Image (cartoon, rainbow, N blue to C red):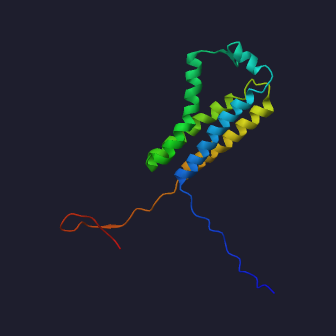
């Protein structure tokens, strides 16, 4: 007869805010890319591209610079979310995610495939809302108690 093994609780380590933000921006980046890639399978899209038109715009260097810039935003936010100091990180994520929400919504306006683009936008907005919430609720540390400086002018922290 086997003796039952005691069950153990899985460890649930705290994930740093920076890692959460970088993961969410990675998701946003992949959604941007995959929605664009999947859009190639819509009837007529490749034909229009071969004719020099993307959406309603003529293919040009300025258009492609704009596309690259828009894709670079979440890419750089992955890096910035892991490297900026906390205060700058929080502010940057709040501003950029707030600006990205209307941009994401623009992709569904006037589209004929509203379910497809609507789902893409909804998923992006969910991730952007998570970014906003994570940055807004960034944990704060309590100020440390300090005692007056010692004769050699170094701050002595209370034990």
Please name the residue shown 58% across and 38% down the image.
98
Residue farthest to the left, as pictured: 151
Residue farthest to the bottom, as pictured: 1
Tell me where residue 152 appears, x and y as whole percent: 18, 66
Rendered position, 88 above or below 36:
below
* Quarter that holds the C terminus: bottom left
Tell me where residue 143 appears, x and y as whole percent: 40, 62
Rendered position, 103 above or below 83:
above
Please name the residue shown 63% across and 47% down the image.
130
Please name the residue shown 68% across and 32% down the image.
105
- Residue 58 appears in which quarter of the rendering? top right
- 50 or 13, which lies in front? 50
Q: Is residue 16 left or right of residue 126?
A: left
* Quarter that holds the N terminus: bottom right
- 46 or 112, which lies in front? 46
Rendered position, 113 above or below 142:
above
- 12 or 37, which lies in front? 37
Please name the residue shown 27% across and 64% down the image.
155
Rendered position, 84 above or below 60:
below
Q: Is residue 96 left or right of residue 35?
A: left
Tell me where residue 146 appears, x and y as whole percent: 32, 66
């Amino acid at each position: 007869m086997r003796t039952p093994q005691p069950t153990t609780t899985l460890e649930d380590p705290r994930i740093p805010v920076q890692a959460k933000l970088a993961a969410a921006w990675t998701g946003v980046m992949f959604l941007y890319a995959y929605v664009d890639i999947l859009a190639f399978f819509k009837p007529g899209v490749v034909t229009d591209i071969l004719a020099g038109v993307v959406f309603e715009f003529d293919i040009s260097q300025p258009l492609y610079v704009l596309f690259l810039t828009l894709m670079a935003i979440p890419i750089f936010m992955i890096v910035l979310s892991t490297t900026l100091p906390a205060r700058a990180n929080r502010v940057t994520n709040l501003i950029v995610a707030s600006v990205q929400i209307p941009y994401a919504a623009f992709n569904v306006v006037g589209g004929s495939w509203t379910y497809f683009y609507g789902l893409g936008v909804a998923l992006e907005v969910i991730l952007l809302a998570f970014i906003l919430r994570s940055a807004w609720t960034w944990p704060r540390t309590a100020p440390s108690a300090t005692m007056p400086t010692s004769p050699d002018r170094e701050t002595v922290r209370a034990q």
